[in-house]
Amino acid sequence: MAKWASSLSQWAEERWNLKKGLSPILDTEVTEYKTKMRFCWGGMTFALIVLELITGIFLAYYYQPSVKGAFQSIAFITDQVYLGWLVRGIHHYASYLIIVTVVVHMMIVFFRGAYKPPREMTWVSGIFLLVLCFAFSFTGYLLTWDQRGYWATRIGTGMASELPIIGEYLMIFLQGGYGVKQPTITRFFISHVIVLPVFLIGLLVAHFLMIRRQGVKKPF
Amino acid sequence: MEEAKQRKPTFYPDQFFTEMIIFLFIIGVVVTFSVILPIGYEEEANPLVTPSTINPEWYFLWLFQVMKLVPPTIGVLVPFVLLGILILLPFIDTKEIHTFREHRWFIWVGVLALVIIFILSIWATLGE
Amino acid sequence: MGEKTAIEIENPTPPVSRRKLLRFITALLGLFGMGAIFSSIIAFLTPPRSALKKVGGWQFVGTLSEFKENSLVKTYFGLPVILIKNGKGLFSFSTVCPHLGCIVIWDEKKKKFICPCHDAAFDEEGKVLKGPVKPYNLLPMEIKVEGERISLKLPEDKLPAYPSWFRITMISGV
């Protein structure tokens, strides 16, 4: 290693003692399967989620969560903002790919019987992560305030009201009022950019900690 | 050389760099999609007109088709029932297994579910 | 007091169970507190009933001279309605599909109203023909003609037969 690099690392080490502090994370032994590419679907999903977070933050710089401004701001990002079309494209296609990788990930776990004890809670946290993915997709869909998003939300929230007992309450709760209007955009926006990501990060941490504790199931 | 073989893989660098390769690959894929098929934007929302072709996203097509076939209340309950089954699965099926053969019934049910979802999606795409 | 202590020394169960009881009470209080916070959050996030701005009553929608063909599309408090004039007279109904709320379109070839979402179909009087909406017809509106002026009214007595999201859409407008 170059001399300056080693002295830089020594300088950092003296100040923050990172090597020791991060050792429990970095130096943990992982089973050899974990570094094999065919066990990559969970890792791919994680990579995609990181990509969604980054592009989502970029989009939030220009997006306006309002009936009047939402569609205009989407058009503005796409047509005017430098590389705006690319950021939107990545956010869009990564969300598609997440569904693909999550489903493949689940299928592999299911077919290998890897959900069985002692990994049952890892599986359950995974199911909740799947639910979160759909929640992200549902809330994000309205934000463009185009015909597809608007009608999908009207149908989706209408469907919620068909549930027995809690249906009507759930619809009003989801819409943030009566009908798909400004309060719905506000509500979906806040859920999409703050509430769901917080739950997502929490569940992901739990998911990863359990995977680390239990390891990957041995292949047959 | 001998020592390198003996060393067990650790999170850093083994798993970390595998992850990084995956990450670069993923970026490549989504950027390629965004360039080849730019997403653009559609018409602004209009509460007075439902577009004549209104299909949901492809991953909800199967549910869309179910909604066409059964009363709304039953249709809405379908995804919740499926999620319930998936959550309870590891508490019901706790038997330890060592071969695929011992697991074959679950594999068949899983494949059947996937096939049904696939057929419903195709059906919804083709319409009537 | 002294006697009691003696008993306690002989039989060490009471202090332990008292500690257990205290722990139990603390846990109960904690649970109660959590429940209070959680239910308050849900209550806060629930839109208040007053957010419902009720619409209804007679609204002027158009004049007879606007009829070029035998139908006319108008809005009633932002909701799409259709006015039809044929041999049987003048009548009107809402074009919100009672299945899941899409707006039905008149199909000239099939002579039917078709819902683009889940393939429901209605005849020219709004009666359901097929689809997942079997029991529900398109909601007929009350109609009043004064000279040239046509006014519509939401028939509130007919609403209870419809699903809850439909009632809410109708009484809140768009």
Image (tube, coloured by chain):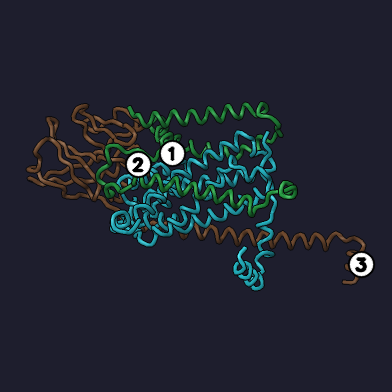
**What chain is tagged by disc 3?**
C
**In the rendered view, would you say C40 is above or below B111?**
below
Q: Residues under labels 2 and 1: Cα distance? A: 35 Å
Circle on res. C160? 2
For marks 3 and 2 on the same chain, the one whose residue lies earlier in the sequence: 3
Q: Where, by quadrant of the figure, is residue A21 drawn?
A: bottom right
Colour of chain B in the rendered structure image: green
Q: CA distance from mark 3 to mark 2?
A: 73 Å
Please tell me whether mark 3 sits on a helix, a strand or a loop.
helix
Q: Which residue is mark 1?
A: B59
**Image position of C56 with respect to C29: above or below:** above
Residue farthest along the front direction in this orientation = A2
Vertical arrangement, residue A24 with respect to residue A109, above or below: below
Q: Which residue is mark 3?
A: C6
Mark 2: few/some/many CA within 10 Å (<14, 14-19, 20+): few
- Tell us which disc is closer to us: 1 or 3: 1
The local crowd at label 3, few if under 14, some if 14 to 19, many if 20 or more residues have their Cα within 10 Å, is few
Residue A171 appearing in the image: no
Q: Where does the image place residue A32, in percent across and percent down from the top left?
A: 67, 44
Q: Colour of chain C?
A: brown
